[in-house]
Amino acid sequence: MRQAKFSVEESQSLFLNSFKQYGFKDKSAMLRAAIDRFKKEIELESLKKSADLYSEIYSEDDDLKALTDTAVNGWPE
């Protein structure tokens, strides 16, 4: 596993020191879990923005709506 050196605020350090209270074996495990969770949140936010953009484009494009209606014609509801 790679190691990295970084700085945290004192309150963040105190929080990391309470790793056992949150069920982690050490500070590194707690920090890795936090990074993984933050990564998922960022990816989800990006996905939501993309979906919003596609929705906006779709709502403003009558040709695209017609194409979609044609494509789904005959599909069971």
Image (spheres, grey):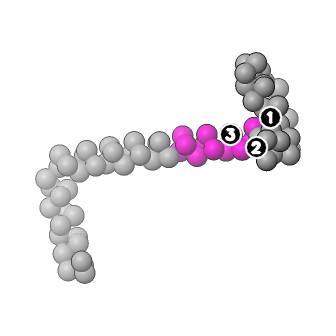
Q: Residue type at mark 2: give it.
A: Tyr
For this rendering, which residue is in front, 22 or 60? Answer: 22
Q: What element carries label 3?
A: helix
Q: Quadrant of residue 32?
A: top right
Determine whether label 1 and label 2 are within 8 Å by CB.
yes
Q: Mark 1 points at which residue?
A: 18
Q: Quadrant of residue 18?
A: top right
Q: Residue type at mark 3: give it.
A: Ile
Mark 3 or mark 2: name the one nearer the start of the chain: 2
Q: Distance between the residues labelled 1 and 2?
A: 7 Å
Q: Name the residue under label 2.
A: 22
Compared to 21, does 62 lie above or below?
below
Q: Is mark 2 on a helix, strand or loop?
A: helix
Q: Residue type at mark 1: give it.
A: Ser
Mark 3 or mark 1: name the one nearer the start of the chain: 1
Q: Which residue lies furthest to the top in this view?
A: 10
For this rendering, which residue is in front, 6 or 25? Answer: 25
The residue located at (73%, 25%) in the rendering is: 12
Residue 1 image point, x, y percent? 86, 44
Left/right placement of residue 54 relative to residue 37 reads: left
Residues drawn in magenta: 31-43
